[in-house]
Amino acid sequence: MLSDFIIIGGGISGLATAFKLRSEGAAVTLLERNEIGRESSWAGGGILYPLLPWDYTDPVNLLTRHSLDLYPQWIADIAEHSATDPEYRTTGMLVLPQFDLPKARAWCEANNTPYSHTQPFPGLPQGLWLPNVTQVRNPRLVRALREACQNIGVKLHENTTVNHIYGAQEHVSHLIANGQEWHAEQYILCSGAWSSKLLDNILPQRDLKPMRGQMLLYKTEAGALPTILYQNSLYLIPRQDGHILAGSTVEDAGFDKSSPPETLSWLARRSGEIFPLLADLQPIHHWAGLRPGSRDNIPLISRHPGLQNMWLNLGHFRYGVTMAPGSADLLAQLIAGEKPPLNMMPYQA
């Protein structure tokens, strides 16, 4: 099968890249080893913000800002080709102690980010209130993006595992997936935590690995929690229908997606401490996802250093959904030979 582009990986990064390139007229084929969008993209919380951005480096914050600037139009573009509502909305986020308040205030002021140190809602404690933080509902976003890709002509292939990438003289010749040869002019690796397995052959010594995150789901009355709550690396995310997501752990457990009972108990206890209503409720569901861990949360968005027709868009760690439209936009500009608005050196392979 010949295509302008073959994208390896059907998570949020692969789908966003496919949607961008196909929207610009390219022929795009996407290969996903399992079901499209059902790994970390489905499992995450959907907070569109770098948690405590004052603790992150400029490459993370600049990329997330670029991506968030694109988000409203990106959601509108997806909606033209999909009937699924991704529930993109502004709910704000209340950061609860303990955190470095002077550092947080200084960052917000330097970056023109609205904030107040207040009690924004009755019944919630005082904290740093960030009113402009947005969210999406991950499963609905990936479903909408899948529908949009399919409706504009991206060729989607599920349960198609890439076993080997063949290259010679700085050029990928073809892929082998499910025993079949796949050919394209250019190839893009967007396979998340599983990229490390493929990169062993073509890009050794990269600090990429799966990082497990556990999530709980509660059901409350709609509006019971009016905003995202964050405290000491854990968050509670309210959905429009009253569901509340609680997460997430960060565990170096390889490709193990099991949920140890003691970890779930700890997560439930901490959720009840942050929002006491949950202390009297039992979670209705729990799951684990494998984030594509990377050094300092900085993804790779670049041409492969040794293969001229291979591109990388991977390693977004906790912020794949947040960075999705921005990363796809920057990669498309690199492929087109244009000069992106960001300094791309930190994202080079």
Image (cartoon, rainbow, N blue to C red):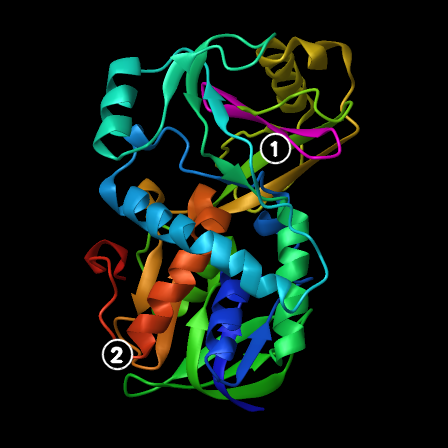
Q: Dot 2: what SS?
A: loop
**Residue ID for mark 2:** 337
Question: Is the residue 302 above or below the residue 232 in the image?
Answer: below
Which label belongs to residue 214? 1
- Residue located at (76% from left, 10% from top): 280
Residue 267 image-quadrant placement: top right
Magenta stretch bounds: 229-245
Expressed as whole percent of the image width and height from the top left, the position of residue 238 reads 64, 29
Q: In which quarter of the image is the N terminus?
A: bottom right
- Residue located at (50% from left, 89% from top): 183
The type of residue carrying mark 2 is: Gly
The type of residue carrying mark 1 is: Gln
From the image, state whether disc 1 or disc 2 is nearer to you.
2
Q: Can residue 203 be seen in this view?
A: no
- Residue located at (35% from left, 82% from top): 309
Expressed as whole percent of the image width and height from the top left, the position of residue 307 reads 31, 78
